[in-house]
Image (tube, helix red, strand yellow):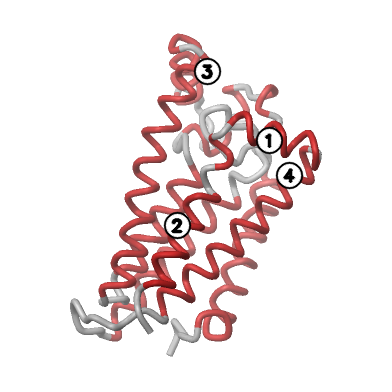
Amino acid sequence: MNWLETALAFLVFFLSHSIPVQPLLKSKLVTRLGASGFSIAYSLLSLGTLYWLLLATSRAPFVELWQWQLWQNHVPIVAMLIALWIAAMSVGRPNPFSFGGARNETFAPAKCGLVKWIRHPLLIAMLIWSLAHIVPNGDLAHMLLFGSFSCFSLFGVWAVDRRKKTAMGLSEWSRLKQESRRQSELLPGMPFIEVATRTFFGLAAYAVLLFSHSFLFGVSPIN
């Protein structure tokens, strides 16, 4: 197997992820599919292209960069708990600073939740995921894959900040950021029941991924 499939999967994945930052294309799709229809369709497209990219990477020629050792598996096992908790605490909550939020017009610093600490929770979750998976995958193809995602996450923080500052106005962006950080609560505006529920779903997602990893990707992280 050569590198062609991996290169093609990379191209399709990153092209598909340019849709949300193309206002004209996105507005046409939302008009045709509806807001919820677009979200569902785009989520399925993202998951499908990501899964293909991961499989294509596993089928790429093996070029060893460092030898695998058992302790390396523990890095993503621990890190993914953190990444999935961050994602679970953020999805569907108002967040005008980044993507992945909902009802952003209702955002208030007093109810900012995890945004007090992390403006871009989904990008940070992706960064943790990608960096952690570099450790036990010491071959060129996986280094390119997870290294690209790490760079994409870091670039995304800068790019989204830049776009949001322009859209919101620098003074409003700065005001919301400063007021959110000044909140005294650990997770402002998030009652215990919401924190517990989101933590439960984060742990459930973690368990599903942990025990289905060998089925989905052909490698078990716990063996």
Identify residue for label 3: 167
In this rendering, is residue 182 above or below 208? above
Q: Earlier in the sequence, mark 2 or mark 1?
A: 2
Type of amino acid under label 3: Ala
Q: Residues within 10 Å of mark 1 (few under 14, many from 20)?
A: some
| Mark in front: 2 vs 1 | 2
The answer to which quarter of the image holds residue 44 is bottom right
Q: Position of residue 112 (x, y in %)?
A: 58, 30
Which secondary structure, mark 4?
helix
Q: Residues within 10 Å of mark 4 (few under 14, many from 20)?
A: some
User: Which numbered disc covers residue 54?
Assistant: none
Q: Are marks 2 and 1 in contact (CB under 8 Å)?
A: no
Instruction: Pick the residue in front: 145 or 195.
Output: 145
Q: Are marks 1 and 3 in contact (CB under 8 Å)?
A: no
Identify residue for label 1: 102
Q: Position of residue 38 (x, y in %)?
A: 73, 44
Identify residue for label 2: 11
- Residue at the location (72% across, 52% down)? 41
- Residue at the location (50% across, 49% down)? 15
Q: Earlier in the sequence, mark 4 or mark 3?
A: 4
Q: CA distance from mark 1 to mark 3?
A: 17 Å
Q: CA distance from mark 2 to mark 3?
A: 28 Å
Q: CA distance from mark 2 to mark 1?
A: 28 Å
The answer to which quarter of the image holds residue 23 is top right
| Mark in front: 4 vs 3 | 4
Instruction: Pick the residue in front: 142 or 123.
Output: 142
Q: CA distance from mark 1 to mark 4?
A: 14 Å
Identify residue for label 4: 38
Q: Earlier in the sequence, mark 1 or mark 4?
A: 4
Which secondary structure, mark 2?
helix
Q: CA distance from mark 4 to mark 3?
A: 22 Å
